[in-house]
Image (tube, rainbow, N blue to C red):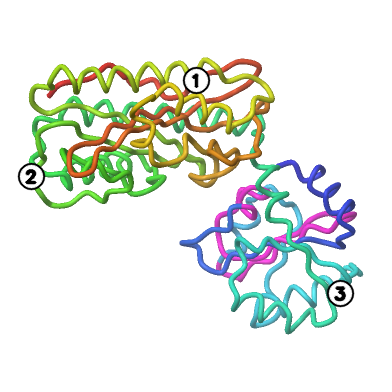
Amino acid sequence: MKLNEFQNILEKKNCDFAVFYTADSSRINPNLFYFTGYSGIGILVVPKKHRPFLIAPQMEFQRAKKSSIKKVYSMEKKRFFESAHSIIKKNSIKTKNIAIDKNNFTLNSYKHFKRQFKKSKTKDIALECLKLRGRKTEKEVQILRKSCNYADNILQKTIKNFESFKTESEVSAFLEYETKKLGLELSFNPIIASGSNGSMPHYEPKNIKIKNGFCVIDFGVKYKGYCSDITRTIYIGKPSQKERGIYNLLLGIQEDSIKMVKNNIKCSGIYDFVCNKLGKYKNNFTHGLGHGVGIEIHEMPNLTLNSTDRIKDNMVFTIEPGVYFPNKFGIRIEDTILFKGRVKVLTRTSKHLLIV
């Protein structure tokens, strides 16, 4: 995807080629997958003027051949970068300046890389890759819509069956089971935070009885390599007037902040809007307002206090205000949003307070 655009970036940065590397199939390099659709072990080389090519081990060769990259080599040497150096040399590609993504290049990999490309200078293109991936193609948008649709259906089924669950870990296991039953992956480990546990935004569900009060359910699936992200807060028992009031305040703010999204608006401006609307509860809002969603669960743009990002066409991101009261409860409401001339909410599960 967007390979021509990326090659223009290499030209501007005066780089002869870029190299993306995946050594472990359980930790896929997001940029290698982005440009190829290939999720196996291997190296992608993108020259600024020649056709890109993949280098894969023999066991992955047939799978690599099914990627969007037409030119695929089987490893010639025992080590990846040794093989890459040999193939690059055969293709008469200069090696003076090489672009690498330092966010996805381990120190050990870099050591092996420099052993082969001793005289080469490296330039980091991590930020350029993130910006490129921040604006989705129509194909990506369709995949993300489907990913959100799957997440909605699974979450609705979970909420419908909520009375049958005894523990937080049972809810988490059900979400994972329903995801895998459809041949999908989780975007991240689900958060099931009941009662006072909800006051911790990144709480990990435990094998403990579900507590009365608010219960935060944060969940997403990965479909064709693309993530979705949704959070709903339900109530177990009977909420007080004050609890209902705080929930409805947060829901109104979340919906108003979605409505104010427009082209070129500062992400920090939307964050400020939420803080101002929260009034006396603004200090109980302890995390960013949202983040881009794509191949990774956290991408650009960042909707945070000091963010310099702006909303542009074809961006997909979350809006997820929350309030947290230590040792008491927490509430978070999150949707995945598409901006394309106007706002489109991709996660459609009801946000009215459900009482179980």
Question: How far separated are the C-alphas under marks 2 and 1?
Answer: 35 Å
Residue 35 in magenta stretch: yes
Q: Is residue 177 left or right of residue 30?
A: left
Which residue corresponds to the image point at 43% horizontal and 17% vertical from the top-left? 255
Which residue corresponds to the image point at 35% horizontal and 28% vertical from the top-left? 333
Task: Identify the residue under disc 1.
Answer: 258
Residue 41: quarter of image: bottom right
Task: Identify the residue under disc 2.
Answer: 209
| 93 is higher (above) or lower (below) than 191 | below
| 341 is higher (above) or lower (below) than 323 | above
Q: What label sits on residue 89 in the rendered view?
A: 3
Identity of the amino acid at label 2? Lys
Q: Earlier in the sequence, mark 2 or mark 3?
A: 3
Find residue 99 and report its horizontal and vertical position in percent. 77, 62
Identity of the amino acid at label 1? Ile
Q: Which residues are magenta?
A: 31-59
Which residue corresponds to the image point at 21% horizontal and 19% vertical from the top-left? 244
Q: Which secondary structure lies at badge 3? A: helix
Q: Quadrant of the N terminus?
A: top right
Which sits in the foreground, 14 or 198?
198
Q: Which secondary structure lies at badge 1? A: helix
Q: Residues within 10 Å of mark 2 (few under 14, many from 20)?
A: few
